[in-house]
Amino acid sequence: MSENHKPLVVITGASSGIGAATAKLFSENGHPLLLLARRVDRLDALGLPNVICAQVDVTDRDAVKEAVKDAEEQFGPVDCMVNNAGVMLLGFLADQSPDEWDKMLSVNVMGVLNGVNAVLKPMVQRQGGTIINVSSVAGRKTFPNHVVYCGTKFAVHAITENLREEIAASNVRLTTIAPGAVETELLSHTTDENIKSGYEDWKTAMDGIISAEDVARSVYFAYSQPQSVCIREIVLAKTTQQ
Ligand code: NDP
Protein backbone atom coordinates (compact mmCIF):
# COMPACT_ATOMS: atom_id res chain seq x y z
CA MET A 1 0.00 0.00 0.00
CA SER A 2 1.28 3.48 -0.81
CA GLU A 3 1.52 6.33 1.72
CA ASN A 4 -1.91 7.31 0.45
CA HIS A 5 -4.51 6.02 2.92
CA LYS A 6 -7.58 6.57 0.79
CA PRO A 7 -9.17 3.37 -0.52
CA LEU A 8 -8.90 1.79 -3.94
CA VAL A 9 -11.33 2.86 -6.69
CA VAL A 10 -11.77 0.89 -9.93
CA ILE A 11 -12.98 2.63 -13.10
CA THR A 12 -13.78 0.75 -16.30
CA GLY A 13 -13.56 2.54 -19.63
CA ALA A 14 -11.15 5.13 -18.26
CA SER A 15 -9.26 5.62 -21.53
CA SER A 16 -11.53 8.46 -22.70
CA GLY A 17 -14.56 10.60 -21.94
CA ILE A 18 -16.42 10.17 -18.66
CA GLY A 19 -14.13 7.42 -17.36
CA ALA A 20 -10.96 9.48 -17.90
CA ALA A 21 -12.52 12.56 -16.28
CA THR A 22 -13.69 10.45 -13.33
CA ALA A 23 -10.23 8.94 -12.93
CA LYS A 24 -8.67 12.41 -12.78
CA LEU A 25 -11.17 13.61 -10.16
CA PHE A 26 -10.76 10.59 -7.88
CA SER A 27 -6.99 10.87 -8.25
CA GLU A 28 -7.05 14.58 -7.34
CA ASN A 29 -8.92 13.51 -4.23
CA GLY A 30 -6.15 11.12 -3.25
CA HIS A 31 -7.46 7.70 -4.29
CA PRO A 32 -5.29 4.93 -5.68
CA LEU A 33 -6.92 3.65 -8.85
CA LEU A 34 -7.25 0.60 -11.02
CA LEU A 35 -8.12 1.76 -14.53
CA LEU A 36 -9.39 -0.69 -17.13
CA ALA A 37 -9.81 -0.34 -20.90
CA ARG A 38 -8.54 -1.96 -24.07
CA ARG A 39 -6.41 1.07 -25.08
CA VAL A 40 -3.92 0.83 -22.24
CA ASP A 41 -1.70 3.50 -23.84
CA ARG A 42 -4.51 5.99 -23.28
CA LEU A 43 -4.75 4.95 -19.62
CA ASP A 44 -0.99 5.38 -19.20
CA ALA A 45 -1.17 8.78 -20.91
CA LEU A 46 -3.37 10.12 -18.11
CA GLY A 47 -0.15 10.12 -16.07
CA LEU A 48 -1.89 9.75 -12.70
CA PRO A 49 -0.05 8.68 -9.51
CA ASN A 50 -0.82 5.47 -7.56
CA VAL A 51 -2.54 3.96 -10.56
CA ILE A 52 -2.54 0.52 -12.10
CA CYS A 53 -3.50 0.64 -15.77
CA ALA A 54 -4.69 -2.73 -17.06
CA GLN A 55 -5.51 -3.69 -20.62
CA VAL A 56 -8.78 -5.47 -19.97
CA ASP A 57 -11.84 -6.01 -22.11
CA VAL A 58 -14.80 -5.83 -19.70
CA THR A 59 -16.52 -8.67 -21.55
CA ASP A 60 -13.73 -10.95 -20.27
CA ARG A 61 -15.08 -11.84 -16.81
CA ASP A 62 -11.92 -13.61 -15.61
CA ALA A 63 -9.65 -10.78 -16.77
CA VAL A 64 -11.72 -8.19 -14.86
CA LYS A 65 -11.60 -10.33 -11.72
CA GLU A 66 -7.87 -10.98 -12.05
CA ALA A 67 -7.06 -7.28 -12.50
CA VAL A 68 -9.08 -6.41 -9.39
CA LYS A 69 -7.31 -9.12 -7.38
CA ASP A 70 -3.87 -7.86 -8.45
CA ALA A 71 -4.74 -4.25 -7.59
CA GLU A 72 -6.11 -5.25 -4.17
CA GLU A 73 -2.77 -6.92 -3.36
CA GLN A 74 -1.10 -3.55 -3.86
CA PHE A 75 -3.72 -1.09 -2.57
CA GLY A 76 -6.10 -3.05 -0.31
CA PRO A 77 -9.80 -3.78 -0.88
CA VAL A 78 -11.82 -2.00 -3.56
CA ASP A 79 -14.09 0.57 -1.90
CA CYS A 80 -15.70 1.85 -5.11
CA MET A 81 -16.29 0.16 -8.45
CA VAL A 82 -17.34 2.48 -11.28
CA ASN A 83 -18.74 0.42 -14.15
CA ASN A 84 -18.53 3.03 -16.88
CA ALA A 85 -17.30 1.25 -20.04
CA GLY A 86 -19.90 1.36 -22.78
CA VAL A 87 -20.56 1.55 -26.49
CA MET A 88 -23.36 3.29 -28.38
CA LEU A 89 -23.97 2.03 -31.90
CA LEU A 90 -27.08 3.83 -33.05
CA GLY A 91 -29.07 2.29 -35.85
CA PHE A 92 -32.44 1.66 -37.44
CA LEU A 93 -33.01 -1.85 -36.18
CA ALA A 94 -34.11 -3.38 -39.49
CA ASP A 95 -30.89 -2.13 -41.11
CA GLN A 96 -28.44 -2.64 -38.27
CA SER A 97 -26.07 -5.58 -38.11
CA PRO A 98 -26.93 -7.94 -35.24
CA ASP A 99 -23.18 -7.94 -34.54
CA GLU A 100 -23.68 -4.39 -33.26
CA TRP A 101 -26.48 -5.63 -30.97
CA ASP A 102 -24.11 -8.29 -29.60
CA LYS A 103 -21.42 -5.71 -28.95
CA MET A 104 -23.69 -3.32 -27.04
CA LEU A 105 -25.27 -6.09 -24.98
CA SER A 106 -21.94 -7.68 -24.11
CA VAL A 107 -20.14 -4.45 -23.15
CA ASN A 108 -23.00 -2.41 -21.66
CA VAL A 109 -24.79 -5.20 -19.79
CA MET A 110 -22.41 -8.14 -19.30
CA GLY A 111 -19.50 -5.72 -18.83
CA VAL A 112 -21.35 -4.08 -15.93
CA LEU A 113 -22.21 -7.48 -14.43
CA ASN A 114 -18.59 -8.60 -14.79
CA GLY A 115 -17.48 -5.52 -12.87
CA VAL A 116 -20.10 -6.18 -10.19
CA ASN A 117 -19.01 -9.82 -10.00
CA ALA A 118 -15.40 -8.83 -9.30
CA VAL A 119 -16.26 -6.88 -6.13
CA LEU A 120 -19.70 -7.87 -4.85
CA LYS A 121 -19.07 -10.79 -2.49
CA PRO A 122 -16.12 -9.17 -0.67
CA MET A 123 -18.10 -5.92 -0.27
CA VAL A 124 -21.06 -7.81 1.19
CA GLN A 125 -18.71 -9.70 3.54
CA ARG A 126 -16.98 -6.46 4.60
CA GLN A 127 -20.40 -4.77 4.99
CA GLY A 128 -19.33 -1.73 2.99
CA GLY A 129 -18.41 -0.38 -0.42
CA THR A 130 -20.01 1.36 -3.37
CA ILE A 131 -20.84 0.23 -6.88
CA ILE A 132 -21.63 3.01 -9.36
CA ASN A 133 -23.02 2.00 -12.73
CA VAL A 134 -23.07 4.51 -15.57
CA SER A 135 -26.36 4.21 -17.42
CA SER A 136 -27.96 7.04 -19.41
CA VAL A 137 -31.09 9.12 -19.84
CA ALA A 138 -31.53 6.48 -22.55
CA GLY A 139 -32.07 4.07 -19.65
CA ARG A 140 -35.16 6.00 -18.59
CA LYS A 141 -36.75 7.03 -21.88
CA THR A 142 -36.44 5.93 -25.50
CA PHE A 143 -35.07 7.84 -28.50
CA PRO A 144 -35.18 7.20 -32.26
CA ASN A 145 -32.48 4.77 -33.54
CA HIS A 146 -31.63 3.74 -29.97
CA VAL A 147 -33.50 0.40 -29.73
CA VAL A 148 -30.65 -1.82 -28.54
CA TYR A 149 -28.67 0.94 -26.80
CA CYS A 150 -31.79 1.93 -24.81
CA GLY A 151 -32.40 -1.76 -24.08
CA THR A 152 -28.94 -2.07 -22.57
CA LYS A 153 -29.28 1.09 -20.50
CA PHE A 154 -32.77 0.19 -19.21
CA ALA A 155 -31.10 -3.07 -18.16
CA VAL A 156 -28.34 -1.18 -16.30
CA HIS A 157 -30.99 0.82 -14.43
CA ALA A 158 -32.95 -2.32 -13.51
CA ILE A 159 -29.89 -4.34 -12.49
CA THR A 160 -28.48 -1.53 -10.35
CA GLU A 161 -31.71 -0.71 -8.51
CA ASN A 162 -32.69 -4.34 -8.02
CA LEU A 163 -29.24 -5.24 -6.69
CA ARG A 164 -29.41 -2.23 -4.37
CA GLU A 165 -32.62 -3.59 -2.89
CA GLU A 166 -31.19 -7.10 -2.67
CA ILE A 167 -28.12 -6.14 -0.65
CA ALA A 168 -29.23 -2.98 1.16
CA ALA A 169 -28.99 -4.73 4.53
CA SER A 170 -25.29 -5.42 3.90
CA ASN A 171 -24.51 -1.66 3.86
CA VAL A 172 -23.21 -1.77 0.27
CA ARG A 173 -24.33 1.18 -1.86
CA LEU A 174 -25.52 1.00 -5.46
CA THR A 175 -25.82 4.14 -7.58
CA THR A 176 -27.01 4.70 -11.13
CA ILE A 177 -25.59 7.72 -12.96
CA ALA A 178 -27.79 8.68 -15.91
CA PRO A 179 -26.32 11.43 -18.08
CA GLY A 180 -27.98 13.02 -21.08
CA ALA A 181 -25.77 13.72 -24.09
CA VAL A 182 -22.11 14.27 -23.12
CA GLU A 183 -19.26 15.52 -25.35
CA THR A 184 -17.06 12.38 -25.67
CA GLU A 185 -15.96 9.82 -28.28
CA LEU A 186 -19.14 7.78 -27.77
CA LEU A 187 -20.96 8.79 -30.98
CA SER A 188 -17.88 8.19 -33.15
CA HIS A 189 -18.43 4.40 -33.19
CA THR A 190 -21.89 4.64 -34.80
CA THR A 191 -21.53 3.49 -38.39
CA ASP A 192 -24.62 5.17 -39.92
CA GLU A 193 -23.44 8.60 -41.13
CA ASN A 194 -27.00 10.02 -41.45
CA ILE A 195 -27.79 9.15 -37.85
CA LYS A 196 -24.47 10.62 -36.75
CA SER A 197 -25.06 13.92 -38.51
CA GLY A 198 -28.65 14.08 -37.16
CA TYR A 199 -27.23 13.66 -33.65
CA GLU A 200 -24.73 16.46 -34.27
CA ASP A 201 -27.59 18.74 -35.44
CA TRP A 202 -29.52 17.88 -32.24
CA LYS A 203 -26.48 18.87 -30.16
CA THR A 204 -26.16 22.16 -32.04
CA ALA A 205 -29.86 22.91 -31.49
CA MET A 206 -29.26 22.54 -27.73
CA ASP A 207 -26.32 24.94 -27.95
CA GLY A 208 -23.90 22.17 -27.02
CA ILE A 209 -24.00 19.47 -24.36
CA ILE A 210 -22.46 18.76 -20.96
CA SER A 211 -18.84 17.71 -20.49
CA ALA A 212 -17.29 14.53 -19.16
CA GLU A 213 -16.11 16.57 -16.16
CA ASP A 214 -19.74 17.50 -15.38
CA VAL A 215 -20.57 13.79 -15.11
CA ALA A 216 -17.40 12.99 -13.15
CA ARG A 217 -18.48 15.46 -10.45
CA SER A 218 -21.78 13.58 -10.08
CA VAL A 219 -19.97 10.26 -9.73
CA TYR A 220 -17.68 11.73 -7.09
CA PHE A 221 -20.58 13.45 -5.30
CA ALA A 222 -22.43 10.14 -4.96
CA TYR A 223 -19.34 8.35 -3.69
CA SER A 224 -18.26 11.05 -1.26
CA GLN A 225 -21.43 10.96 0.84
CA PRO A 226 -21.19 9.13 4.16
CA GLN A 227 -21.53 5.34 3.74
CA SER A 228 -24.89 5.58 5.54
CA VAL A 229 -26.26 7.72 2.66
CA CYS A 230 -26.94 6.05 -0.68
CA ILE A 231 -27.50 8.32 -3.66
CA ARG A 232 -29.62 5.88 -5.64
CA GLU A 233 -29.69 7.73 -8.94
CA ILE A 234 -28.48 10.93 -10.51
CA VAL A 235 -29.95 12.11 -13.82
CA LEU A 236 -28.10 15.06 -15.33
CA ALA A 237 -28.15 16.73 -18.73
CA LYS A 238 -27.66 20.02 -20.47
CA THR A 239 -30.35 22.39 -19.21
CA THR A 240 -31.58 22.89 -22.78
CA GLN A 241 -31.90 19.12 -23.41
CA GLN A 242 -35.57 18.03 -23.34
P1 NDP B 1 -16.21 7.13 -24.73
O1 NDP B 1 -16.39 6.44 -26.04
O2 NDP B 1 -15.39 8.36 -24.69
O3 NDP B 1 -15.66 6.12 -23.63
C1 NDP B 1 -16.05 4.78 -23.61
C2 NDP B 1 -15.06 4.01 -22.77
O4 NDP B 1 -15.49 2.64 -22.70
C3 NDP B 1 -13.67 4.03 -23.35
O5 NDP B 1 -12.73 4.23 -22.33
C4 NDP B 1 -13.51 2.64 -23.94
O6 NDP B 1 -12.17 2.21 -23.83
C5 NDP B 1 -14.38 1.82 -22.99
N1 NDP B 1 -14.78 0.55 -23.55
C6 NDP B 1 -15.56 0.33 -24.62
N2 NDP B 1 -15.63 -0.99 -24.86
C7 NDP B 1 -14.88 -1.61 -23.92
C8 NDP B 1 -14.57 -2.94 -23.63
N3 NDP B 1 -15.05 -3.96 -24.37
N4 NDP B 1 -13.76 -3.22 -22.58
C9 NDP B 1 -13.27 -2.22 -21.84
N5 NDP B 1 -13.53 -0.92 -22.05
C10 NDP B 1 -14.34 -0.62 -23.08
O7 NDP B 1 -17.70 7.44 -24.23
P2 NDP B 1 -18.29 8.02 -22.86
O8 NDP B 1 -17.24 8.49 -21.95
O9 NDP B 1 -19.36 8.94 -23.26
O10 NDP B 1 -18.99 6.71 -22.28
C11 NDP B 1 -18.85 6.27 -20.95
C12 NDP B 1 -20.19 5.72 -20.47
O11 NDP B 1 -21.12 6.80 -20.41
C13 NDP B 1 -20.80 4.68 -21.39
O12 NDP B 1 -21.37 3.64 -20.61
C14 NDP B 1 -21.90 5.44 -22.11
O13 NDP B 1 -22.94 4.61 -22.53
C15 NDP B 1 -22.34 6.39 -21.00
N6 NDP B 1 -23.07 7.57 -21.45
C16 NDP B 1 -22.52 8.44 -22.34
C17 NDP B 1 -23.24 9.52 -22.81
C18 NDP B 1 -22.72 10.43 -23.87
O14 NDP B 1 -23.52 11.17 -24.46
N7 NDP B 1 -21.41 10.47 -24.13
C19 NDP B 1 -24.60 9.78 -22.31
C20 NDP B 1 -25.06 8.84 -21.34
C21 NDP B 1 -24.32 7.78 -20.94
P3 NDP B 1 -11.37 1.33 -24.93
O15 NDP B 1 -11.96 1.65 -26.26
O16 NDP B 1 -9.95 1.82 -24.76
O17 NDP B 1 -11.54 -0.08 -24.48
Image (cartoon, rainbow, N blue to C red):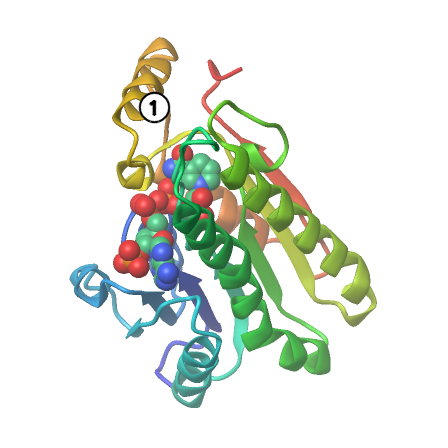
Q: Amino acid at mark 1?
A: Ile
| Left or right of residue 235: residue 162 | right
Q: Residue furthest front?
A: 94
**Residue 12: x percent and y percent?**
41, 61
Can you see residue 24?
no
Q: Nearer the viewer, residue 72 or 153?
A: 153
Q: Nearer the viewer, residue 74 or 156?
A: 156
Residue at x 63% of width, y 52% of height = 175
Q: Secondary structure at mark 1?
A: helix
Q: Under 8 Å from ligand 1: the CB of mark 1?
A: no
> How many numbered badges does the structure rendering display?
1
Can you see residue 186?
yes
Query: In the rendered image of this protein, does residue 238 appear above or below residue 232?
Result: above
Q: Quadrant of residue 170?
A: bottom right
Query: In the rendered image of this protein, does residue 128 appear above or below residue 95?
Result: below
Name the residue that disc number 1 marks: 195
Q: Residue furthest right?
A: 169
**Residue 189: x percent and y percent?**
29, 41
| Left or right of residue 140: residue 67 | left
**Picture quarter with the N terminus:** bottom left
Q: Quadrant of residue 168?
A: bottom right
Query: In the rendered image of this protein, does residue 238 appear above or below residue 152?
Result: above
Residue at x 52% of width, y 68% of height = 115
Q: Residue furthest bottom?
A: 73
Neighbour tally class for label 1: few under 14, some 14-19, many 20 plus, Cα within 10 Å: some
Q: Nearer the viewer, residue 208 or 113?
A: 113
Residue at x 46% of width, y 27% of height = 145
| Left or right of residue 3: residue 137 | right
**Residue 176: x percent and y percent?**
61, 47
**Residue 50: x percent and y percent?**
30, 74
Residue at x 33% of width, y 17% of height = 198
